[in-house]
Image (cartoon, rainbow, N blue to C red):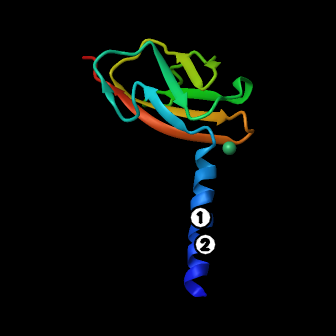
Amino acid sequence: MRPLIIIISLFIAVLGTANAWAHAHLDRASPAVGSTVASAPKEITLWFTQNLEAVFSTVEVLDGSGARVDDGKPSITGNTMRVALKPLAAGTYRVHWHALSVDTHTTDGIFTFQVSVP
Ligand SMILES: [Cu+2]
């Protein structure tokens, strides 16, 4: 009987993982996660795996000293969140997003990108 129990446990674990994937996770970003860009981007765009609730989804973009360099008002359409950026100097920037998906689950994450303008 024991192998059967293990198989059932694995099956439940896999189902649980599939359910977690149904939340609004970051699918991709521009500038890309962990990338280095040669010119300062004027905005950052985040694409999620699910549509977002606009009112409760936010993003902060911080420079190396922790100062915000986004204009504070993301525009959200469907699964896409976009925010304008102040003029960026060379350096590493941290993007911290919070998403409330239409299934009412919240997710958040942090990634960085670098600007290599001289
Ligand atoms: Cu969910």
Task: Name the quadrant containing residue 14.
Answer: bottom right
Marks counted in the figure total 2
Task: Tell me the quarter of the picture where residue 42 sits.
Answer: top left
Q: Is residue 63 left or right of residue 57?
A: left
Task: Give me the residue at 50% from left, 20% from top.
Answer: 69
Q: Position of residue 37 (x, y in %)?
A: 31, 23
Q: Position of residue 88 (x, y in %)?
A: 40, 16
Q: Quadrant of the C terminus?
A: top left
On screen, residue 33 versus residue 6, left or right, reads left
Would you identify the image quadrant in which residue 13 lies? bottom right
Ligand 1: image quarter: top right
Q: Secondary structure at mark 1?
A: helix
On residue 76, the disc is none
Q: Tell me: 103 left or right of 13.
A: right
Crowd tier of the residue under label 2, counting other residues whose Cα lies within 10 Å: few below 14, some 14–19, many 20 or above = few
Label 1 sits on what residue type? Answer: Ala
59, above or below 103, in the image:
above
Residue drawn at x 59%, y 28% as measured from the top left:
59
SS of the residue under disc 2: helix
**Mark 2: amino acid:** Ser
What numbered label is drawn on residue 13?
1
Q: Badges 2 and 1: C-beta atoms under 8 Å apart? A: yes
> Mark 1: is the Cβ under 8 angstroms from ligand 1?
no
The numbered mark at residue 9 is: 2
Name the spot of residue 12 as percent of width and height, x first: 63, 65
For the residues marked 2 and 1, what is the alpha-carbon distance in whole angstroms? 6 Å
